Structure formats: structure tokens, C-alpha cells
């Protein structure tokens, strides 16, 4: 697919449902008793992998226009899958489901695409094994395929080395099946959708600071969940609206949970003109975002804010390339173990576009303000890379080609359609 410079961006966009929340709604709905009704579910390939996995374990899930109905069978209602469970490209499905499978009375095997088979699973294998789980990497490389033999589990207090919602969630979900309390402490707080939603379903869970604690077993009950728009998907429109001269766009119904809103804080610190409208604080908070073109300047991004914007760093790189001065990103080594190595890939292609960017062990340094020129980019099977460079193409001179651009189906199937609709060229 090829992309050209945009004149300006104008209009409204409604962002599809949050990927993290959509996954969890299907998973927890499957473990609950009764029906869970999910509206604004993200129909992206990752979340469909989650639906597929639970269907293979005997859960009836209706995916009708506008609504998902999960007919949960309770904490002990899953059946042994007849075949290998395919996680597709989804790290969230792989790691969270492992926590659930660790406590089931059956064996299962998980696999996924080329990207998932390279992502580190030791981070969940270690705590789950400490709880008594039998979980092995079939190829002995600490990656998927994983073979899990369900076992009786013990409560532990796990001190995670990484601030990872996937690690935290895997341990808390296993904790539903343990013989006592399970606690997870992380170095800084990662996204807390699991804690919020498990409590809403009736779990005995409390969280304080960077520690979450769950007690095993009260029955979970089916609920109604209206998924907010995904701030990680909104990020591409925030960046595009800020960097393309003359732009003004309204991004509707965006989740602004404080464990996910780092992009807003950083964009404003860079000088971005973003106004929050129609804020709603019932359950997961949401707002409409009015974004206007702004002259941006470089900033330093490090420390506790990193987990709140980890998936937005590729597109923040694009903003930094267009900003005056230097942006330094530190404490983001996790970027290396996402769908691609997001430090290497961003450095490779932003350099090709004429940006002065250097990769470091845990981030990047960008001397912004040089005009960007079109380049040939490869998505590396990474939706966030494809969408970030589609945004860069809006300000680059010439025709940017993105190979593997259809990977956006992972988290935002209509991304190009929505972006093109707002652009005048
Ligand atoms: O699901 P997956 O493939 O890991 O997706 C990504 C993404 O960019 O969409 C990461 F590559 O998001 C993760 C995120 O980085 C989704 C997630 C979650 O839903 O719990 C948590 C984060 O990962 P982690 O490893 O920090 O827990």
C-alpha cells in the first residue's frame, strides 16, 4: 500500500473498542455464570483469537452485529480443547489464557504466528510454575508453543521484574484457582483493566499501589460491558492531528484510564493542543478528544509514565521526529519484545525517512525538526509499526510504501478507511 502527504485533517472519528478490555470481557465472561453482553467489542484479529480459543473449550459465544453474547459456564466449566489453541498474533491472549489453563483439570497446547513464537514466555512460566503449574515451552526456547498440564495451584506473592499487565493478569487469573491468596507486586503500575473488570464480575480482588491481591474462588457473574474506544488506536489520530498543519479533529469515546493515558500527558507536554470533552467517569473513564495542529517540541519520557504509553511509543516517535529539539525515551526496553523489536524497526525506517534518530538499550534519542521524506517500510508483522508509518507518510515528501500494511486488522481493521476519510490531499 502507498501513502501520500496530506494537506490537512478535518472531521470526526469514532475509535473502535479497546483491545485489552475486549479480550478480558470474553475471558472473564467465559469463566462467569450466566450471560455476558459486550457492546463495542473490538472485531480485530487478536480479539477474535480469544473468542476462538474459548469456543474450543466449550463456551458458546454469539458474535452478532453490534453485540457479543458470552454464555459463561463458571470457573470450572471449561472443557479440554480437542485441538491446539491458536493465539494468532496476540500476546495478551497467550499470556492471560495460560494463567487460566494452569488451573484446569486438563492438558492444552497453545501456539501462534511467527511473531508470537518469538515473544518471551518465561515471564509467565516462572510465576505460574511457582504456583505449581506444569507449563513447558515445546521447543525449549521459553517461547510458544506452550504445553500446559492443569494442576492444583498455591497462592504466592510474586514480585514481577517487569511492569506488565499480561504477567500480572496471568498470575491473578491463576489465583482464582489457587488454595489461598495470590499477590502480585510490579515495579510500576501497568494497565489495571483486569483488576477493575474481575472485581466487577464479583472476584474477591483488591489493589493498592503497585500490588494486587486476589482470593480464590467466589463465583463470577455474567455482566454487561460497553467497551470504550481504544486510546492506543486513538493515538494515531492524535499524532496525525497534531503534526499535519491546519488540522482539527474530534476523536469520540476514547478510554482515558490513568494507566493508559500517558500519550495525552506527553502530547500536551510537547505543546499539543488537546481538549477533553464529554468526560464520563462511570466505570472505565472516557472522553471525546478535540485535537488541533500544534508546533511541538522535544521532551524526555522516562520512569513511571512508560507503562501508560508503551504501545504508543512508535507513534510518539513520529511526533518527536516532527517536533523541534530533542526527545529522549528511556526505561522502555520492553519495546524490544513486542510484535517486533520496536526500537530497531522505528530507528531503521525513521532514519530512512531522514530523521535523526539513534536507538539505545532502553529507548531512543530523536533530534526532531528535519523534514521527512517518503521511504519503503515493512511492518514486520506489527500493526503499530504499520499505523505509525501511515501517520508519518502524511507529512513526508513523496510516496511512502508500507509492505505488510494489512496487519492493521489485528487491532483496527478500518484504520486506513478512517484515516483517509479525514485527509484532504
Ligand atoms: O497482545 P499484544 O500482542 O501483546 O499487544 C500489545 C499491542 O501493541 O497491541 C503489545 F505488543 O499490547 C499489550 C501491551 O503492550 C496489551 C496488554 C494487555 O492487554 O494486557 C499489555 C501490554 O503488554 P505487557 O507485556 O506490558 O503486559
Image: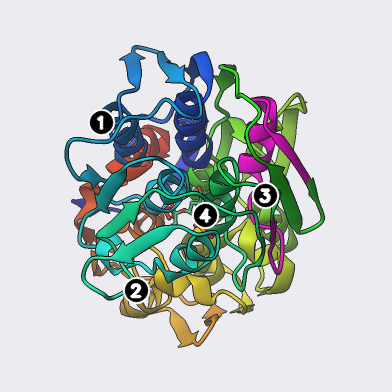
Camera-side residue of 411 and 334: 334
Residue 168: where, in percent of width, then height? 59, 55
User: Which span is picked out in magenta?
Assistant: 183-206
Of labels 3 and 4, the one closer to you: 4
The residue that mark 4 highlights is 166
Q: Residue furthest right?
A: 208
- In the figure, is residue 377 to the left or right of 47? left
Q: Which residue is mark 2?
A: 345
Instruction: Identify the image's colour scheme: rainbow, by chain, secondary structure or one colour.
Output: rainbow
Calculate the distance from the C-alpha at mark 3 to the C-alpha at mark 4.
18 Å
* Residue 29: x %, y % from top left: 49, 24
In magenta stretch: residue 193: yes
The crowd level at tag 3 (other Cα within 10 Å; few <14, some 14-19, many 20+) is: many
Residue 30 painted magenta: no
- Left or right: 339 with respect to 266? left
Picture residue at 45% right of the left edge, 26% below the top: 30
**Disc 4 C-beta below 8 A from ligand 1:** yes
Taking the image as shown, residue 81 lies to the left or right of residue 293, namely: left
Q: CA distance from mark 4 to mark 2?
A: 23 Å
Tell me the number on the disc at residue 261. 3
Amino acid at each position: 500500500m502507498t501513502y501520500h502527504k496530506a494537506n490537512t485533517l478535518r472531521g470526526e472519528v469514532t475509535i473502535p473498542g479497546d483491545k485489552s478490555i475486549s479480550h478480558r470481557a470474553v475471558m472473564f465472561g467465559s469463566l462467569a455464570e450466566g450471560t455476558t453482553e459486550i457492546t463495542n467489542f473490538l472485531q480485530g484479529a487478536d480479539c477474535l483469537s480469544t473468542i476462538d480459543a474459548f469456543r474450543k473449550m466449550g463456551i458458546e459465544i454469539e458474535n452478532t452485529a453490534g453485540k457479543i453474547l458470552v454464555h459463561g459456564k463458571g470457573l470450572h466449566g471449561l472443557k479440554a480443547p480437542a485441538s491446539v489453541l491458536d493465539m494468532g498474533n496476540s500476546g495478551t491472549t497467550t499470556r492471560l489464557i495460560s494463567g487460566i489453563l494452569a488451573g484446569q483439570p486438563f492438558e492444552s497446547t497453545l501456539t501462534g504466528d511467527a511473531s508470537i513464537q518469538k515473544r518471551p514466555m518465561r515471564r509467565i512460566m516462572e510465576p505460574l510454575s511457582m504456583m505449581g503449574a506444569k507449563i513447558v515451552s515445546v521447543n525449549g526456547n521459553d517461547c510458544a508453543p506452550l504445553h500446559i498440564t492443569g494442576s492444583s495451584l498455591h497462592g504466592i506473592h510474586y514480585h514481577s521484574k517487569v511492569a506488565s499487565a499480561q504477567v500480572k493478569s496471568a498470575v491473578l487469573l491463576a489465583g482464582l484457582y489457587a488454595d489461598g491468596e495470590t499477590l502480585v507486586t510490579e515495579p510500576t503500575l501497568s494497565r489495571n483493566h483486569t483488576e477493575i473488570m474481575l472485581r466487577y464480575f464479583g472476584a474477591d480482588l483488591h489493589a493498592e499501589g503497585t500490588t494486587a491481591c486476589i482470593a480464590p474462588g467466589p463465583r463470577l457473574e455474567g455482566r454487561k460491558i460497553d467497551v470504550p474506544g481504544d486510546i492506543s488506536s486513538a493515538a494515531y489520530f492524535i499524532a496525525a492531528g497534531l503534526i499535519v498543519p491546519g488540522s482539527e479533529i474530534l476523536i469520540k469515546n476514547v478510554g482515558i484510564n490513568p494507566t493508559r493515558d500517558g500519550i495525552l500527558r506527553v502530547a500536551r507536554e510537547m505543546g499539543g493542543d488537546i481538549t477533553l470533552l464529554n468526560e464520563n467517569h462511570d466505570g472505565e473513564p472516557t472522553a471525546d478528544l478535540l485535537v488541533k495542529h500544534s508546533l511541538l517540541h522535544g521532551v524526555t519520557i522516562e520512569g513511571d509514565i512508560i507503562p501508560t504509553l508503551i504501545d504508543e511509543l512508535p507513534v510518539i516517535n513520529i511526533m518527536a521526529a516532527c517536533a523541534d529539539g530533542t526527545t529522549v525515551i528511556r526505561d522502555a526496553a520492553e519495546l524490544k519484545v513486542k510484535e517486533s523489536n520496536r526500537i530497531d524497526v522505528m530507528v531503521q525506517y525513521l532514519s530512512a525517512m531522514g530523521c535523526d534518530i539513534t536507538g539505545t538499550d532502553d529507548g531512543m534519542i530523536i533530534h526532531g525538526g528535519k523534514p521527512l521524506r517518503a521511504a519503503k517500510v515493512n511492518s514486520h508483522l506489527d500493526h503499530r509499526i504499520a499505523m505509525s508509518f501511515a501517520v508519518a507518510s502524511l507529512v513526508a515528501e513523496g510516496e511512502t510504501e508500507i509492505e505488510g500494511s494489512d496487519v492493521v486488522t489485528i487491532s483496527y481493521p478500518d484504520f486506513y478507511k478512517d484515516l483517509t476519510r479525514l485527509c484532504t490531499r
